[in-house]
Amino acid sequence: MSEEHKRNIVIPGEIIVEGDNYLPGEGTEKQGKKIVSMRYGLADESNKLVKVIPLSGVYQPRRGNIVIGKCNLITFNGWVIDIGTAENAFLPLTETPRFVAKDRLDEVMKIGDIAVAQIFGINGRGIDLTIKSRGLGRIDEGLIFKINPNKVPRVIGKEGSMIKIIKDYTNCNITVGQNGFIWIKGDKIEDELFAKKAIEFVTEKSFMEGLTEKVESWFEEQGAVKKESKRHDEKSDEYEEERE
Amino acid sequence: MTTKGYVRSDGRKVTELRSPIKAEVGIIPNADGSAMFQIGKTIALAAVYGPKKMHPQHSQDPEKGTLRCTYNMNSFSVEERIRPGPSRRSTEISKITEWALEPVLMLDKFPNMVVDVHINILQADAGTRCAGINAAAMALAHAGIPMKDMVSSISVGKIDKTLVLDLDKYEDSEFKEGEGSTDIPVSITHAGEITHLQLDGKISKEQLMEVIEMAKEACEKIYEIQKKALKEAVK
């Protein structure tokens, strides 16, 4: 974090900056020369763009987010998936990677199955999902648990740094859904539980500075050995912009 | 006015708020947003759930989200136990709270959804609706609901002919001298807009204008307390 990159907690109606050449970003509004916050969160300014990063509240779905959800209902042309938002998300038949016959929908996903999906559109009627990209689709084995969705960027770390450390030390494959669901897949159940413990440590200590170093020393204390990640980080492109 | 040297039953000055005034955010871990507000002996707790899908479906509004407040006084909140459950009074205050908060909320971003606000009065010593609105405003902000501004609320009273700020229970219900007491709860945004004003009793136009001025000053103080509580909620 550079010096001019200041971050303050703002409340609704509070003036963040005053001046002509600022642009109002998400969670803000321009009122004359002032940029005013429209929600509670961390005010962030970069390249004259001012936005408010949420710190609390329910998960707000966004286009491009990777989410983990449970299949609720099978319709004639797709699946209804509960991703923990007010609106149910819909995964249409056309968004599957291979051809599926209309009467064979439950071969891909049955009611109660868990899947990793990507949000490709949000319209007035609801959220549309896709499982066409790599790393998406039904989950068959592993461990799933939920954390506070506001802590997800912390668990991922800057450009995926935090999750990479956890992956290296626990030798597990971890997929973090932006809606707070985390899927861990390791060779042994002990590894998976250890990774879960590590992630819970991160969420508890999420407001600490220099958390990445703290987590590394925590792993050393636990006696874990770092393995250089042999697997290629195939999911690194899914990590959304990261905040400190 | 002969208000300068007026001393109230509890020794406060006319424009003095009760103390302590305490505010805390994030006290209910299960809720999406929560807050506590205490002024004097009155304690209010607010919890926000949502935005979530409105059920039953026929009450959904496809144009904008709905705010649903529930005000409840706990049976132990007053000296003489009150019957638990909704009453004529609590239904009215729930509606009043909705109207006081709705103007600052940007609910058009949540069509077909509802934001639930549950307000519980743990201890009642007059001014519970104001404490409830203060707590609810903080809880809504904490829940990350888009808001144009914060809302602060205070009750101004007229005891006999004197205007006083923030009535306590004695002044509100037991004061019977002269003209008796009148209670005027006012909710004001930080920008100075009035979102709620209630009056049941008699007051002159001039005095009502004075009431609003007094409330604005007091709400500024309450706003600072709300702001401090919200900023300190994150470490």
Image: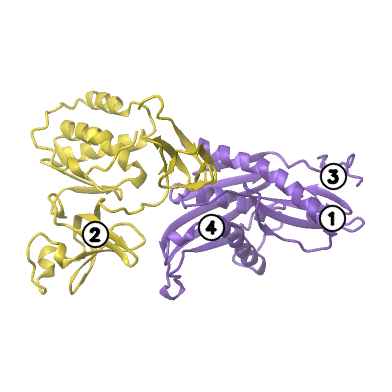
Residue occupied by mark 2: A70
Which dot marks residue B9?
3
Residue A165 x %, y %:
21, 31
Q: Earlier in the sequence, mark 1 or mark 3?
A: 3
Q: Residue at x 36, y 53 (%)?
A: A60
Which chain is displayed in yellow in the rendered image? A
Instruction: Relative to A170, say whether A149 is above or below.
Output: below
Instruction: Relative to A146, say whether A190 is above or below.
Output: above
Q: Are marks 1 and 2 on the same chain?
A: no
Type of the residue with mark 2 = Lys
Classify mark 4: helix, strand or loop: strand
Residue occupied by mark 4: B118
Which chain is displayed in purple in the rendered image? B
Q: For the residue carrying disc 4, how many other residues have a C-alpha within 10 Å: few (<14), some (14-19), or many (20+)?
A: many
Q: Are marks 1 and 4 on the same chain?
A: yes
Image marks 1 and 2: residues in contact by CB distance under 8 Å: no
In this view of the protein, which residue sits in the foreground, B38 or B154?
B154
